Image (cartoon, grey):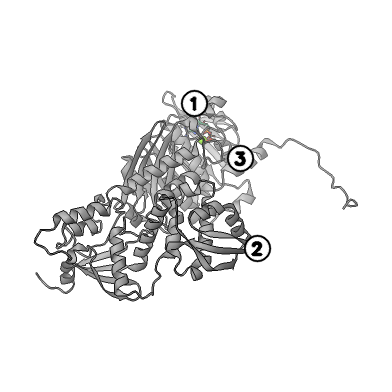
């Protein structure tokens, strides 16, 4: 080593200005959509009521953003393009409480460093508009109405290395539109128009917040959402959350804003996710659009070059606040779904209230929709007792809302008859819900009864799983698992929650891996407080009877009785319904039998 020549070092020199800007631009301007974001945000900061975006070749060839905001004075035009020049903050104290979208005084300079830029602007009091060319710095009179119009051509032609990373025009266009949609969802009173070449790509009229959100969210969101609205001192949250029926396979309909700024924040996303823990698990992604307003002093927006991340000063309090607000919204009576076209609803309470009648307004089969969190079984039983006329003999079918098992179908469904007709139960989904609620009660009572395995399950594990098992030993014990390293690449499972003991021999290792994956994802010492429901759902999924297990009639009836006694039995942990009712009227309709 020591014999190798020491490489000779070039002298230290200051970088040329343009190169500094190009390097800085690398952080902020990644693609045409980044330019669109910066220009649209500037227009909003200038108080625009209408913003027009024109794109050519997906924005790679040309991006023009025009607004009707306050404009820039002639003398200030060169400063607008200069690096570290801004009208939005003046001191470190201002940085503590930023109220505008921009504040770094960097965006326009960065864009001008990697593209050809010109800007035309006119204030309300000016006698004409003025146009500045960024490359030459020349300012000349121009004809334009009040507002600002920025033209950005040939993005990255000055930095070919960047240009290589651009995708197909259609992809870049899609990113540009997404960017405008994200911003528009938080500014409903501003009109937005986007053109690509000569075609209208997006048109959003100024209006109400709800109309704007519905225009941007997936189509099925409107009929399956709840309003969120909660306040606490110094913080409030509003917006809409989708019911499980509006869940998606991708996280592509999740909008979260902090003080009007679209952000991606782990803590906030977690809080929302946790609120869905009872009704959505696994890979299903909730749809939501939420606006958090918080005292600007309690959030640091200066942590990421594109400002997409923020730092919350009191993140666990905010987490709790968001979690409870969303939970409360989801728990609201699921009956009040907006929109006439919503699927008909059948649930325990309906059967109790009108055991012989079909569900009002149903033209087809009843299926459960929504969350049914308000379904408490005790009040229901009380109601049933009151509703029953004294002459009806005890023990008849009406005592069991979900009826009595008659058969098992395809190893998946239990068929039962009740007073209203036929009940079809997804036995895995139903059992999963029952196990989940039991685990929850056990954990609330501070003990999940454990059962030691006759033969400990020792299985191969990767280093990450072994490390997680060590790190989270306490949490694992609390949820009834005795899982510990048995070597550098082995784990031993010695005990499981008693409720899951059946079949734990085969499913144990997979259960252990799934739980460890959850623990890694949620992290932190407060996992059990903040992610209790997700963890229990993972356990319940493994504990539930698998498809293709043959059940005796007695077992099926036991399942039905447990479902009746279990809160929220009508929706499994993954948001699927656990049972449906086919009424006699539904059956008559199927057979075209008039009544
Ligand atoms: N559309 C516009 N209308 C009026 N003034 C504008 C407009 N765009 C930019 N400006 C002015 O030019 C300045 C520089 O804009 P630039 O986007 O570079 O920085 P910024 O918005 O202050 O901060 P950031 O870099 O965080 O975006 C702004 O502070 C603002 O005064
Ligand atoms: Mg800006």
Q: Quadrant of residue 303?
A: top right
Q: Position of residue 133 (x, y in %)?
A: 56, 35
Rendered view: 452 above or below 444: below
Q: Position of residue 252 (x, y in %)?
A: 43, 53
What residue is rendered at 51% in x and 66% in y? 453
Residue 116 left/right relative to 381: right
Label 1: how many residues lie within 10 Å, few (<14), some (14-19) or many (20+)? some
Mark sitting earlier along the chain (3/1): 1
- Distance (Cα) linking label 3 and label 2: 56 Å
Mark sitting earlier along the chain (2/1): 1
Q: Nearer the viewer, mark 3 or mark 2?
A: 2
Q: Is residue 241 visible?
A: yes
Residue that badge 1 annotates: 73
- Distance (Cα) linking label 3 and label 1: 22 Å
What residue is rendered at 46% in x and 44% in y? 268
Q: Position of residue 482 (x, y in %)?
A: 54, 59
Label 2 SS: strand
Rendered view: 113 above or below 361: above
Mark sitting earlier along the chain (3/2): 3
In the rendered image, the residue lying farthest to the top is 125
Residue sitting nearer the eye, 413 or 398: 398
Q: Position of residue 78 (x, y in %)?
A: 56, 29
Residue that badge 2 annotates: 487
Label 1 SS: loop
Rendered view: 248 above or below 182: below
Residue 457 left/right relative to 207: right
Label 3 SS: helix
Rendered view: 481 above or below 25: below
């Amino acid at each position: 080593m020591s014999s190798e020549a020491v490489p000779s070092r070039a002298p230290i020199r200051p970088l040329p200005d343009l190169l500094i800007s190009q390097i800085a631009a690398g952080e902020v301007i990644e693609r045409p959509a980044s330019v669109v974001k910066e220009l649209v945000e500037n227009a909003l900061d200038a108080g625009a009521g209408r913003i027009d975006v024109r794109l050519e070749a997906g924005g790679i060839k040309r991006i023009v953003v025009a607004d009707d905001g306050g404009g820039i004075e002639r003398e200030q035009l060169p400063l607008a393009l200069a690096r570290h020049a801004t009208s939005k903050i003046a001191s470190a104290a201002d940085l503590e409480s930023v109220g505008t979208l921009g504040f770094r005084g960097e965006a326009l300079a960065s864009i001008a460093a990697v593209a050809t830029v010109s800007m035309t602007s006119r204030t309300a009091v000016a006698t004409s508009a003025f146009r500045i060319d960024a490359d030459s710095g020349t300012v000349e009179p121009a004809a334009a109405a009040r507002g600002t119009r920025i033209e950005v051509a040939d993005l990255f032609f000055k930095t070919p290395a960047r240009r290589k990373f651009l995708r197909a025009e259609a992809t870049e266009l899609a990113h540009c539109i997404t960017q405008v949609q994200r911003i528009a969802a938080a500014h409903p009173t501003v009109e937005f128009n986007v053109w690509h070449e000569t075609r209208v790509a997006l048109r959003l009229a100024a209006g109400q917040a709800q109309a704007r959100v519905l225009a941007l969210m997936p189509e099925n969101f409107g009929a399956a959402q709840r309003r969120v609205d909660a306040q606490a001192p110094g913080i409030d949250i509003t917006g809409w959350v989708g019911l499980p029926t509006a869940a998606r396979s991708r996280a592509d309909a999740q909008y979260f804003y902090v003080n009007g700024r679209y952000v991606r924040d782990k803590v906030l996303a977690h809080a929302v996710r946790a609120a869905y823990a009872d009704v959505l698990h696994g890979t299903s992604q909730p749809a939501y659009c939420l606006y958090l307003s918080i005292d600007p002093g309690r959030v640091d927006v200066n942590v990421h070059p594109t400002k997409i991340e923020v730092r919350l000063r009191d993140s666990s309090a905010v987490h709790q606040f968001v979690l409870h607000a969303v939970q409360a919204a989801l728990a609201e009576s699921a009956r009040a779904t907006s929109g006439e076209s919503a699927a008909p609803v059948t649930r325990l309470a309906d059967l109790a209230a009108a055991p012989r009648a079909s569900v009002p307004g149903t033209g087809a089969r009843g299926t459960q929709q929504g969350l049914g969190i308000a379904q408490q079984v005790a009040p229901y039983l009380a109601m049933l007792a009151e509703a029953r006329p004294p002459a009806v003999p005890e023990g008849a079918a009406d005592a069991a809302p979900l009826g009595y098992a008659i058969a098992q179908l395809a190893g998946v469904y239990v068929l039962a008859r009740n007073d209203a007709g036929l009940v079809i139960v997804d036995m895995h989904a139903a059992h999963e819900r029952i196990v989940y609620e039991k685990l929850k009660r056990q954990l609330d009572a501070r003990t999940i009864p454990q059962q030691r395995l006759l033969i400990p399950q020792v299985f191969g594990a990767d280093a990450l799983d072994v490390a997680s098992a060590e790190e989270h030993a306490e949490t694992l014990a609390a949820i009834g698992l005795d899982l510990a390293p048995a070597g550098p690449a082995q784990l031993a499972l010695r005990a499981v929650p008693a409720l899951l003991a059946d079949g734990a021999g085969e499913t144990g290792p997979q259960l252990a891996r799934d739980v460890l994956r959850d623990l890694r994802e949620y992290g932190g010492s407060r996992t059990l407080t903040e992610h209790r429901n997700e963890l229990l759902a993972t356990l319940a999924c493994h504990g539930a009877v698998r498809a293709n297990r043959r059940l005796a009639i007695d077992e099926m009836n036991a399942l039905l009785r447990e479902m009746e006694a279990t809160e929220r039995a009508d929706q499994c942990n993954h948001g699927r319904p656990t049972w449906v009712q086919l009424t006699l009227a539904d059956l008559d309709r199927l057979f075209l039998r008039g009544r």
